[in-house]
Amino acid sequence: MDKRTPWGKPGTVAPKPYEFVSFHDQVVRQAVPGHHVLRPDLHTGVLTFRLWTLTPLFVSSGQVALSEDLGLPAGQVVQAHYRIGDRPAVPASSLKGAVRSVAEAVSASCLGITRVNRRDLPDVFSRPCTRQAACPCCTLFGMGGSEAYLGQVRFADALLQEGGQMMVYHLPALYRPRAGAPVYLDQRRRYKGRKFYKHGKPHATAQGGDSEVIRHGSLLSAQVAFTNLSDEQLGLLLYALGLGGSFRLKLGGGKPASLGSLETKPLRLVLRNSQQAFLNGDSTVQAETVCEGEALVAKVHSYITTARKSGYILKQQAEELEQVLRFDRKTLSECPTGIY
Ligand SMILES: [Zn+2]
């Protein structure tokens, strides 16, 4: 019998488009800080950064639309891209989710979002974080439920900039966004790592659903505000944003089909200076310090280095993650065209 699928040769199983980053053997927890006081010894401010699409990017609006209504060539019904007003965008929640999964993987953090039963995880993940005992990522990014805590960072929606373009992309049904456990089992059927999709060369197929995507080579502008971060916490945030350049972020739908590869670049860092200086009547102190260009790149690297050296960014996990999420055009593999 012919078992030919629309996507591959009969009988072939393509290499999996994902890899795993091993779990660290402990979760470090402490009480979350309060939000009401800005501490002069910690960092509070806003980072503006750019997202550059290395492959097409698709974040679904959950709506279908006629292509002509989106300003695209007429005659197709497409899954429309997410928008703020009429501007294509990446919602803050998607950006935060992608950054948080990197930060969780490379720090002594819990598993924030998982569809698996906690009893099947190593003991260290068996209990959730609380306000009294929160891991680095629940402290930074917040937690829900009865322990609701907003976290110390707040993302804004990322907006497509002038010159960015939309297009229709045929995404095989196999690659439509779907649920999947972000962990995997070892030979003894215990979970042992976090799942990340590798970067690859995208190629559209004739079959499959039509999605409105942001074309590769487009630019989005994004912001993250933060309150009372230590050097290590700021280093972890900047690292997880991909600003150290040692890996590229991956975000949105169609990850197994190599969509959503993003290069990030810092644009402007505004740090609020301590209120203490004003209380002391020191008028020589500016309310804000603005950092841009080469100086900002150097500052970003210095915070990341601090977090690496102190072990706040875990060496082994960061190396594994950088291996999985490296983006080198010369060695990028084709995304699987068959069942994987
Ligand atoms: Zn946690």
Image: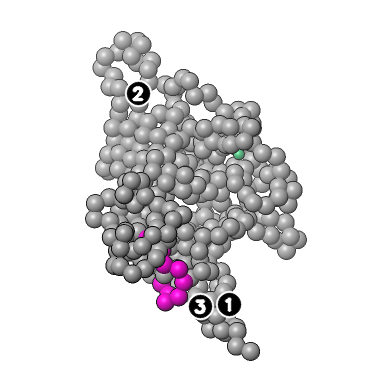
Q: Nearer the viewer, residue 151 or 105?
A: 151
Q: Check disc 1 and report the residue beneath it.
A: 13
Question: Between residues 89 and 230, which one lies in front from this camera angle?
Answer: 89
Q: Image height check: is 180 above or below 122?
A: below
Left or right of 53: which side holds 325?
right
The image quadrant in which ligand 1 is located? top right
Res 7 label: 3
Q: On the picture, is 128 further left or further right than 58?
A: right
Q: Which residue is mark 2?
A: 273
Mark 3 closeness class: few <14, some 14–19, many ≥20 residues within 10 Å: some
> How far apart in space, not on screen, are marks 1 and 2 (Cα)?
56 Å
**What range is drawn magenta here?**
203-213
> Considering only vertical position in the picture, is 192 above or below 14?
above
Badge 2 element: loop
| Mark 1–mark 2 CB contact (< 8 Å) | no
Q: Amino acid at mark 2?
A: Asn
Q: Is residue 170 visible?
A: yes
- Reading the chain from its start, which is encountered first: label 1 or label 2? 1
Q: From the viewer's side, name the closer residue of 75 and 125.
A: 75
Task: Characterize the local packing of mark 2: few (<14), some (14-19) or many (20 or more) Cα atoms within 10 angstroms.
Answer: many
Q: Secondary structure at mark 1?
A: loop
